Image: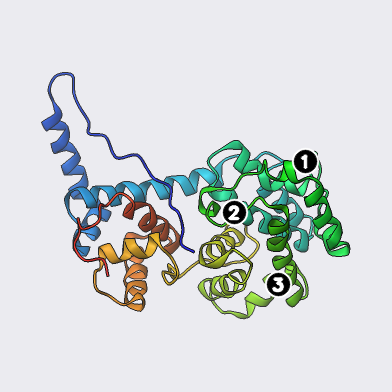
Amino acid sequence: MGRSCGHAAPVEPESSACGGSDRGHSERSARATASPSRRVLTEVGLSDGPLELFEHELDRSLRARRAFWNRHLAPTDILALARRAYAEGNRDEAMWRSFLAAHFGRTSSDSRIQAESASRLLCAFASEPVWTWAVVIAEPGSMQTWLCDNANSVRSLSFGNYRKFASNKNPLLMWSVLESFIRLARSRGSPAGLLDFAPAAKTPGARFDVLFQDFCRILRFDRTGGFDFADLVGALGFLDAAPESCYLKGSTGPLRGARLLWPNRSIGELERLAVELARKLKVDVGILEDTLCNWQKQIPKGLLGAES
């Protein structure tokens, strides 16, 4: 299933009370002309509105990533809880908590209830973790029963933007997703085994790919969930892993964005061009993937010609 991208507000034109809009436009044009990203994107063939929108989305993706990971997380935040478990040497619990964060789309949450949903489930709507990995693996049926017994509370949970199409608040369906991760973890010996399997790969990109291929097997994760879960594991510092591909196959928004930039190319060629563009822009491939996804939503169909 493809990613549903967040929609950024269009860039509003600058204005002046003294009628200086032409001067403002000239200043913006001069700054843009000097921008390294503007030169790279011009070489790709972008110009005018689509180019400005791409620059805006690229900057927004960079700022959003920095702001998210540099801010202080509450001790009860699922990401803080995952880091705490990892710091305590409990890698199984750290991976279980990071899975819950990925399942609820923590990194794409845009409301308090979305941000808190994973930790609320982990803590059984109380203040301390209840459904830890050790408890769940010892008595899986207990959590399934609890989900059904607390169906109304479970339905109060909410999913981040990138997970909204894959989310389901039906207790039995939610359990089927959790159980799918349990089966995957068991196939690697434990949740930590998912990390131990990847280091055999020689590069951060190869390790990311091992995680991605594993995580795509989780029920209702598919390409988007697999990508975001693998990206989260790397961002949390559990493994030196980072994408070296946009994984366009199976995506919706990023693939359309790539086809708008480079029409009539194979997916393999689009992947190569995207990696090359990220290198020239000096950004992580994951940032470019996010930028392509958000940018394409603002480009009306037919504006840039053929898309396939």
Asked if 235 appears above or below 273 in the picture, the reply is above
Task: Tell me what residue is drawn at x 17 percent, y 54 percent.
Answer: 47
Residue 222 as seen in the image, left or right of residue 301: right
Which residue of the protein is positioned furthest toward the right in this rendering?
138
Q: Earlier in the sequence, mark 1 or mark 2?
A: 1
Task: Tell me what residue is drawn at x 63 percent, y 76 percent.
Answer: 199
- Tell me the amino acid under the disc marked 3: Leu
The quadrant of the rendering that contains the C terminus is: bottom left
Q: How is the image coloured?
A: rainbow
Label 2 belongs to which residue?
A: 167
Disc 3/disc 2 C-alpha distance (Å): 19 Å
- How dense is the environment of label 3, judged by Cα within 10 Å: few (below 14), some, or many (20 and up)? some
The label on residue 125 is: 1
User: 229 or 16, which is in the foreground?
Assistant: 229
Figure quadrant of residue 192: bottom right
Q: Nearer the viewer, mark 1 or mark 2?
A: 2
